Image: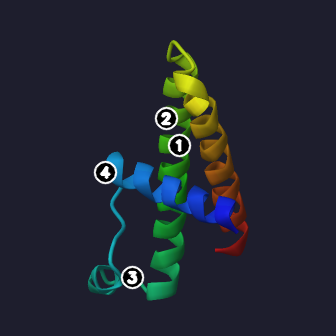
Amino acid sequence: MKKWTLSIFATLGLMLAFGLSVTPPLARLAAGAPPAAQERREGFQDLRRAEQLLNDARAVLKAAPGEYGGHRDKAIKRIDEAIAQLHEAYEHH
């Protein structure tokens, strides 16, 4: 449970750090599309964007010189866990 929680916080932190916006539900209603259909489209866009950002962050960390006391490898592992969570989210969306 603790690892899952850390993965979620890592994902959210990266999303916020890279400026990934999440559209509020009322804005989706105002856009005019049926809520469920638009939510599915936007949800997958958000998930794909989050996965792209995580993969970019992973590549930057992999290319970084030094181990930073083992923290670089731990961060990469957490990113991999967050990506796995996104893959599970695709199935449940």
Task: Estimate the spatial distance between the alpha carbons at disc 4 and disc 3, rounded to whole Å.
Answer: 25 Å
Residue pushed farthest top? Answer: 65
Instruction: Give, as a three-letter code, the residue at label 3.
Output: Ala
Task: Estimate the spatial distance between the alpha carbons at disc 2 and disc 1, rounded to whole Å.
Answer: 5 Å
Q: Quadrant of residue 67?
A: top right
> Residue 54 got which mark?
1
Does 52 sit left or right of 78 as displayed?
left
On the image, numbered disc 3 is attached to which residue?
Answer: 33
Report if the CB atoms under discs 2 and 1 are less than 8 Å apart: yes
Label 2 sits on a secondary structure element that is: helix
Residue 1 location (% of width, % of height): 70, 69
- Figure check: 74 above or below 44: above
On the image, numbered disc 4 is attached to which residue?
Answer: 19
Q: Which mark is nearer the camera, 2 or 3?
A: 2
Q: Which mark is nearer the camera, 3 or 1?
A: 1
> Residue 57 got which mark?
2
Q: Quadrant of the C terminus?
A: bottom right
